[in-house]
Image (tube, rainbow, N blue to C red):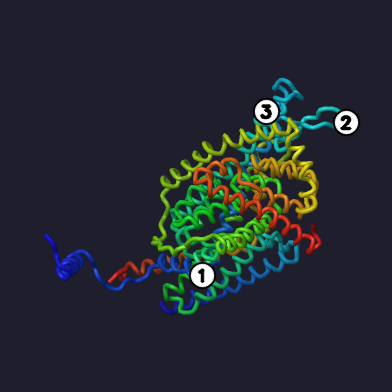
């Protein structure tokens, strides 16, 4: 049976008369609050408050488990026990698995804490379980709550105009926030963006300017007072280089349409499933890289490779970036583990500004191996392009941060 | 009904002024780089995060209250008042959560006890408090108005 246009409209009228109730809709408080969180004048203060709550709870929760319990468990019990029972003290295997230690007055000295021992079973496990696990659990819990309450689409609408300036749109907030947990699902989530240009810009910005949960957890633990400045430099870099990329990368950056759902009470079972799945995914993908990265860093240190590269590149680090020569080693090792590199940096004596510069450099220097592999999966051309951008960004932005420090008289 | 509404408007106007004043005080204390305590009950944190960002949020909470009191009965205006309270709950909730997480472990070095002693646990919750925590009970009054409004809506029906 074929209907004419008029007959179709008649049918539509008939169905709608039977199924739709017409009348004036009276706004509820939930609707009115929903509107407030989307309008820029009122939505931005709410977004600031939500981000404040997010990071405050993140810091308190992670600090509770890491500083309250895990630091003592690993430093006072696990490390001394392993140092005692693991055979071959001072040897290669011992250095890689338990404690690289140090030499004082010609004698081998054991490390006093798990952040300095750099063994797979000590630093590796401490970072994975003692630092990253609490940080990741609370991060994904808060994210799941924001998603299920219905706030994330509103944040996307609120940030749409700003993100258009960097060639993206409001939905780019999803991979960006996911990357704050782990860059790997963040890179995968770039697929929600429509064009190649958008995906390239997003992937490049994630790899360079978004620190992962492991790195944030370590930063929160070892340089908590400098976190604000470090994140500020990364946010500025995200938008400045995003703007430049939008201007030079060919392609389209289309508008997006989004259905903003009403606010809803989150279901505990949904939250549990989401957090459980994401934490499991993180552990399957990232934990082997934490332990393997720790082992490779240990081997490279033992072979003298990192020391050689550090010495060779020291003039660049000291002269161009304004950080001490000793930071060259951790900055090179950052390719394998950014979190461990931050921990290594915390053991080096330097001014607060040098520490800010060094940690920002660790963040923007190179994506970790897991992210690198994921970017390769998305396409080798995109990966090469992102690495080319990254090289330029590291030198220009690193030098610029040094220059700002010189002008402020703090470098 | 109108009398009750104007009572609510006056209450939230005063609360808005006090909240905004506390927000400004938070920002000034943070800018001065020191902490401020008064009468053993009030303590304004001087760190950038709690004092600076927390102060900005408190200031916005005060402004939400003040902008919502005109035509208080209108749902969109009342939502601003409710949002002012929600902002205070976020800051105060974070402060209380931080207190809870600080009160449980002993924070002693190396091989001391794992958990806090009972007196120290209780002492963590003793005053002085941050402005948001002090204003928390006053901000809860909005729940009374939300319930009153909800019961009114049920009586009249939501959609025509």
Q: Work out whether disc 2 and disc 3 sit on a shared chain.
A: yes
Q: Which mark is residue B86?
A: none
The mark that comes first in sequence, 2 or 3, is 3
Whole-angstrom CA distance, mark 3 to mark 1, is 53 Å
Residue mark closest to the camera, 3 vs 1: 3
- For residue A224, above or below residue B116: below
The residue carrying mark 1 is A40
Is the residue marked by circle 3 packed among few (<14), some (14-19), or many (20+) residues within 10 Å? many
Residue A187 percent coordinates (x, y): 52, 48
- For residue A290, above or below residue B77: above
User: Is there a contact, CB below 8 Å, between mark 2 and mark 1?
Assistant: no
Please, what secondary structure does the residue beneath circle 1 have? Answer: helix
Q: Which mark is residue A105?
A: 2
Is the residue marked by circle 1 packed among few (<14), some (14-19), or many (20+) residues within 10 Å? some
- For residue A19, above or below residue A92: below
Chain containing mark 2: A
Residue A300 percent coordinates (x, y): 70, 33
Q: Residue furthest right?
A: A105
Is the residue marked by circle 2 packed among few (<14), some (14-19), or many (20+) residues within 10 Å? few
Q: Is A53 or A259 nearer to us in this picture?
A: A259
């Amino acid at each position: 049976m074929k209907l004419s246009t008029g007959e179709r409209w008649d049918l539509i009228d008939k169905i709608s008369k039977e199924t739709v109730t017409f009348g004036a809709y009276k706004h509820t408080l939930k609707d009115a609050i929903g509107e407030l969180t989307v309008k820029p004048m009122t939505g931005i203060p709410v977004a600031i408050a939500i981000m404040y709550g997010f990071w405050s709870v993140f810091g308190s929760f992670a600090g509770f488990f890491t500083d309250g319990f895990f630091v003592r468990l690993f430093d006072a019990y696990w490390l001394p026990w392993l140092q005692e029972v693991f055979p071959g003290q001072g040897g290669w295997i011992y250095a890689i698995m338990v404690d690289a230690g140090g030499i004082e007055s010609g004698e081998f000295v054991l490390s006093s804490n798990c952040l300095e021992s750099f063994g797979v079973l000590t630093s590796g496990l401490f970072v994975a379980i003692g630092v990253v696990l609490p940080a990741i659990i609370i991060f994904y819990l808060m994210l799941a709550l924001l998603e299920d309450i219905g706030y994330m689409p509103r944040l996307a609408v609120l940030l749409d105009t700003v993100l258009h300036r960097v060639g993206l749109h409001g939905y780019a907030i999803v991979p960006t926030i996911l990357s704050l947990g782990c860059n790997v699902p963040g890179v995968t989530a770039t697929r929600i963006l429509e064009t190649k240009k958008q995906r390239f810009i997003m992937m490049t910005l994630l790899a360079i300017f978004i620190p992962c949960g492991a790195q944030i957890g370590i930063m929160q633990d070892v340089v908590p007072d400098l976190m604000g400045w470090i994140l500020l430099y990364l946010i500025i870099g995200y938008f400045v280089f995003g703007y430049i990329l939008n201007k030079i990368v060919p392609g389209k950056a289309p508008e997006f349409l989004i259905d903003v759902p009403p606010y809803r009470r989150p279901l505990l079972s949904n939250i549990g499933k989401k957090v459980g799945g994401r934490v499991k995914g993180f552990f399957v993908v990232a934990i082997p890289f934490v332990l393997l990265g720790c082992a490779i860093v240990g081997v490279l240190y033992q072979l003298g490779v990192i020391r050689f590269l550090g010495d060779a590149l020291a003039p660049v680090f000291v002269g161009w970036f304004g950080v001490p020569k000793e930071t060259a080693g951790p900055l090179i090792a950052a390719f394998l583990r950014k979190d461990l590199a931050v921990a290594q940096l915390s053991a080096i004596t330097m001014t607060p500004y040098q520490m800010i510069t060094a940690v920002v450099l660790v963040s923007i220097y190179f994506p970790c191996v897991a992210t690198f592999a994921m970017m390769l999966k998305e396409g080798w051309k995109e990966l090469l392009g992102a690495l080319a951008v990254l090289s330029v960004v590291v030198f220009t932005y690193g030098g610029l941060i040094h220059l700002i420090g010189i002008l402020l008289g703090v470098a | 009904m109108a009398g009750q509404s104007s009572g609510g408007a006056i209450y939230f106007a005063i609360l808005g002024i006090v909240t905004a004043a506390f927000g400004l005080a938070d920002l000034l204390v943070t800018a001065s780089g020191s902490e401020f305590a008064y009468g053993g009950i009030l303590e304004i944190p001087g760190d950038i995060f709690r004092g600076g960002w927390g102060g900005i949020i408190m200031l916005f909470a005060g402004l939400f209250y003040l902008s919502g009191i005109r035509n208080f009965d209108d749902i969109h205006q009342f939502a601003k008042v409710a949002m002012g309270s929600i902002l205070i709950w976020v800051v105060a909730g974070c402060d209380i959560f931080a207190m809870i997480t600080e009160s449980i472990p002993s924070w002693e070095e190396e091989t001391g006890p794992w958990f806090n002693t009972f007196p120290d646990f209780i002492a963590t919750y003793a005053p002085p408090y941050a402005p948001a925590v002090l204003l928390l009970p006053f901000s809860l009054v909005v729940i009374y108005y939300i319930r009153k409004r909800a019961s009114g809506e049920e009586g009249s029906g939501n959609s025509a």
